[in-house]
Image (spheres, helix red, strand yellow):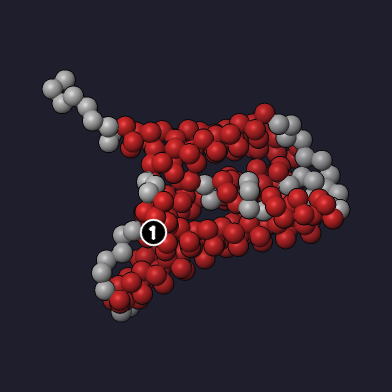
Amino acid sequence: MSGQLRQIVEGVLLVFAALLPIVNPFGGAPVFLAMTADCSAEMRKALAQRVAINAFLLLLFSVFVGTYVLDFFGLSVPIVQVAGGLVVCALGWDILRQDTAVPPPSPASGDAAADIATRAFYPLTLPLTVGPGTISVAITLGANHSGGMRSLLVNGASELIGVTLIAATILLCYRYADRMLRRLGAAGTSVLVRLSAFILLCIGVQIFWNGVSALAATLPVARGH
């Protein structure tokens, strides 16, 4: 294996291993199903595809230009973590309190279809699938490029392939979430949805705390104490 090919493979594995645990499409699948309970099977399939595409574009944007956008607005990653952590906490809390009984899907009307199209980005893509923690990790990955055109091309190819694999995993998990949860039954689905919502709430708290801790470390303190 040539040096460049090996570097690309290692880069792909790094991106995939860094993003998959925090994206966690396996844990997000039951929440996705609960939030699309009013959709038909065909509409849920189309919605899963839209979420995967949105996630791909958002991750790609975060990796390649996220650092420049934050610099342009004078923002830091900890600020994004604090604000995004609050949004994730709110989403997890709402899902945790709602009735997790999944009604039988019904065909969506024109207005419902437009509402579902809107939900494809918020909250299903952001912050459920690609939250502030994922964005901060993606920005960090993109900020670690070394100089040189060859290195830039190798890293860019690795990140593109890695993000594509993440999006494909999201598509598979969300597309077949109903089959997975159908085997669990109503009681198992309710438990899994509430557990996933609680984990989502905990993730939001952790993201928020990471941001607060990073900001607190920048405050001037009395070193004599």
Residue at the image position 46 percent from the left and 68 percent from the top: 160
Residue 4, position as x, y percentages in the image? 31, 76
Most extreme residue toward the bottom, as rendered? 2
Residue picked out by circle 1: 68
Residue at the image position 80 percent from the left and 46 percent from the top: 38
Which class describes the residues within 10 Å of circle 1: few (<14), some (14-19), or many (20+)? some
Residue at the image position 52 percent from the left and 47 percent from the top: 131
Residue 205, position as x, y percentages in the image? 48, 33
Q: Determine which quarter of the picture holds residue 186.
A: top right
Position of the C terminus, as image quadrant, is top left
Position of the N terminus, as image quadrant, is bottom left
Relative to the observer, which residue lies in front, 70 or 155? 70
Residue 36, position as x, y percentages in the image? 73, 47
Examine the rendered structure and indicate whether residue 36 appears above or below residue 156: above
Q: Hey, what amino acid is under mark 1?
A: Tyr
Relative to the observer, which residue lies in front, 202 or 118? 118
Most extreme residue toward the top, as rendered? 225
- Whether residue 201 is visible to the viewer of this picture, yes or no, is yes
Residue 160 horizontal side relative to residue 172, left or right: left
Q: Determine which quarter of the picture holds residue 157.
A: bottom left
